[in-house]
Amino acid sequence: MERDTHFVTGVYEDEDVLLKAITQVRSSGIKIHEVYSPYPVHGIDDYLGYKRSRLPIAAFLFGLLGTTLALTMQFYMMKFDWPMIIGGKDYGAFPDFIPVTFELTVLLASFGMVGVFMVSTNLKPWAQPRIFDLRITDDKHVLAIDIANNSSMELAKIEEILKSSGASEVNKKSFE
Amino acid sequence: MQVTSSVREPLVTGGKSYHDVTHDVSRHVEAKPNIRWFLAFLTSAGVLALGSIAVIATVWEGIGMWGLNKTVGWAWDITNFVWWVGIGHAGTLISAVLLLFRQKWRTSINRAAEAMTIFAVICAAMFPVLHMGRPWLGAYWALPLPNVFGSLWVNFNSPLLWDVFAISTYFSVSLVFWYIGLIPDFATIRDRATGLRKIIYGALSFGWDGAAKSWSRYESVSLILAGLATPLVLSVHTIVSFDFATSVIPGWHTTIFPPYFVAGAIFSGFAMVLTLMIVTRKVYKLEDYITMGHIELMNIVIIITGSIVGIAYITEFFIAWYSGVEAEQYAFINRATGPYWWAYWSMMTCNVISPQLFWIKKIRTSIVATFVLSIVVNIGMWFERFVIIVTSLHRDYLPSSWAMFYPTWADVGVYLFTFGLFFTLFFLFAKFFPVINMAEVKSVLKSSSDKVNK
C-alpha cells in the first residue's frame, strides 16, 4: 500500500463535535493527515498541534525591505544623483520622504507576505487540489487519516474510533 | 468554540444552516441573469459609452475641453477624484478596521464594500490620468523612471507624487485583500459546478483545498493585511488632503485637513455602501444576511463621521477668523456669502444637518429614509470638495484675475463616464462573484442561528 494515496475520512457536521473528535482521535494514537473545513474553525490549530504561522515574520522582513529600498531610492535620486533646491529645503528632505517610504513599506510587506502565502499553500490557477469530499466547501468538516501512516492500527479500529467520536459518516477515499 | 449571546441581536436571521448560506449566495452566480439585471447592466454600459465620447474628446483635443481657466486651474477633475477616492474608503474600513476591532457584523458586507472600493479607486484614477493631457507620457511624470534628461527624477517633495504612490499602493493592496477573501468562496462555487464553470472557478479558486493548515495561514494573512491596510487607508486620504494643505492658498493651507478628509471619506463611503447594499439585498433577497441591524450600525457610523465633518467645518471657520489673516478670513466669508453661496449651503445642509436625522431611531431603521439620506450625503460630499477647491481658487490675491468656473459638456461627460464605469463593474461583480463572503459568514453563523446551534 502506497503512502499518501489511501485515506479513511470521517465527516462531521458541527465544529464543536469536530474539535472534541480531534482530541479523541489523536489520544488514541492515530496520526491525522489533515482536517478540511468550509470556514476557519477557531482554535483548530491548537487541537491539531500546529505551530503558529510564520507569515507575520515574512511580512515584517518584506516591509523592512520596502522601507530600505524607498529611503535609498529617494536619497539617491534627490540628494546625490540630481540635487535640486525645492522650497528652500535640504536636498535630503527626510520628512518629505516619509509618505512614499510608508507606502512602499506597506506595498512590499503585503505583496511579499501574500506571495509567500501562495507558495507555501500551493495556490495557483492551475493547481489540482485533492478534494476529499465535495461538501467541505459547503457545510461539512472532514477529518482525513492516511491509512499507510497508521499501519500499526487495523482499519476497522480506526473507523470505529471515528464513528464513536461523532462522525456522521465514515468513508474511504483513494487518489491516483 | 463559539459562545452564543442572548443579549445581542443575531447577525444572520432566518435560522440559516451552513448549506443555506452556500445556496443563498451561490445561486446568483449560477442562475442565468434576469431581465432586471440586464436592464441595469445595459443602462450603466450605455452611460459608460456615452461618457467615453467626452473622454476621447479630452484625450484628442486636450484638457482645454474642460471649463478650467487661468484662475480656476483645478475644478471638477480633482473634485471628482477626491470624491471617488473618499467613497472607496469605506470598503477598507469595513474589512480591515472592523476586523481588527473584531466586529463580526462586517462579514456580510465586507465583500461588496471592498469591491466598491476597488471600482471607486479605478474611477478616481481616471481624473489625474486625464488631467495629464498626454497620458501616454504619464509614466515619466508619475514614476521615477530614467529618461533622456540624464535621469531628471520625479519630485519626491511633492504631495502630488505622494498621491501616485498612495493611490497605487491602496489600489493594489485592496485588490489583493479582496482576492484572498474570494479564494475560498470561488472554491465553494467550483465544488458545486460542472463543466466550463468548474474549470473557470477552479482556476479562480487557485486550488483551494480548505485544509486546516491553509485556513490557519489564511487567517494570519487576513489579520496582517488588515493591520497594514488600516494605517494605509488613513494615509491615503491624508495624502490626498496634502495636495491642498501643503499649498499657500487661503482656504487650503489648513492643518485640520488630514483628519477632516479621512472622516469625510468614511462618511461618504458608508453612504455609498448603503446605497448599493439596500438595492443588492432587495434584488438578491439577502435580507437575512444584511439585516436591519447592519443598516442601523452603518447609519451610526454615518452620524459619527458626519458630526466630525460638521465640527471640522465650524472649526475651520472659527480658525480663519481667529488667525487674523485677512486673506484667510475673506476666503471663508466668500465661501458662505460669495457667488458660490449655493454650493456652500448645499454642502452644509447635506453633510451637517441631514446625518443628524439618524439620531431618530425611526429614521435610521427605515429603508427608504436611509436610501434617500445616503444619496443626499454623497451629493453633500461632492459639494464639499467643490467648495474647497473652486471657491478657494476663483478669487485669489489679485482681484483683476477673479473668475468663475463653468463646466463644459466634457466635464459632465467625463464625470458620467466614471459613473458608467463604476456601475458596470459593480453589476458584473454582482453577477459573477459571490456578493457575500460565505466562508466568513459561516464562521459567525453559530452565534446567530438556532438551526446550526445544537
Image (cartoon, helix red, strand yellow):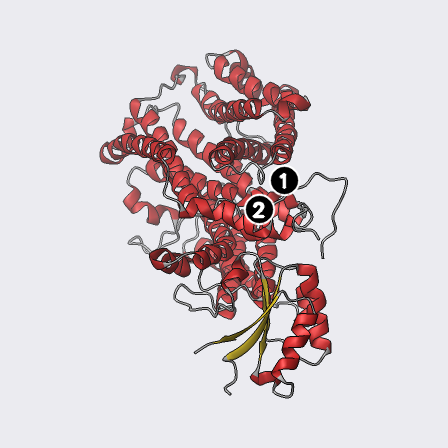
Quarter of the rendering occupied by the N terminus of chain B: bottom right
Residue drawn at 39 percent across, 24 percent down = B72
Q: Residues within 10 Å of mark 2 (few under 14, many from 20)?
A: many
Residue B343 position within the rendered picture, expressed as x and y whole percent measured from the top left: 48, 17
Which numbered circle lies on residue B95?
2
* Picture quadrant where residue A166 is located: bottom right
Asked whether residue A31 is in view, the answer is no
Closer to the camera in the image, B177 or A74: B177
SS category of the residue bearing label 2: helix
Residue ID for mark 1: B13
Asked whether residue B304 is in view, the answer is yes
* Picture quadrant where residue B418 is located: top left
Position of B268 compared to B393: left or right?
Answer: right
Residue A46 position within the rendered picture, expressed as x and y whole percent measured from the top left: 70, 68
Residue A108 position within the rendered picture, expressed as x and y whole percent measured from the top left: 50, 59
Mark 2–mark 1 distance (CA, rounded to whole Å): 21 Å
Residue B290 position within the rendered picture, expressed as x and y whole percent measured from the top left: 57, 38
Letter of the chain that mark 2 sits on in the rendering = B
Q: Residues within 10 Å of mark 1 (few under 14, many from 20)?
A: some
The kind of residue on which mark 1 rests is: Thr
Letter of the chain that mark 1 sits on in the rendering = B
Closer to the camera in the image, B298 or A71: B298
Nearest to viewer (mark 2 / mark 1): 1
Compared with B414, B325 (above or below) is above
**In the rendered structure, which disc, 2 or 1, sits on the residue that comes first in sequence?**
1
SS category of the residue bearing label 1: loop
What is the tally of numbered marks visible in this picture? 2
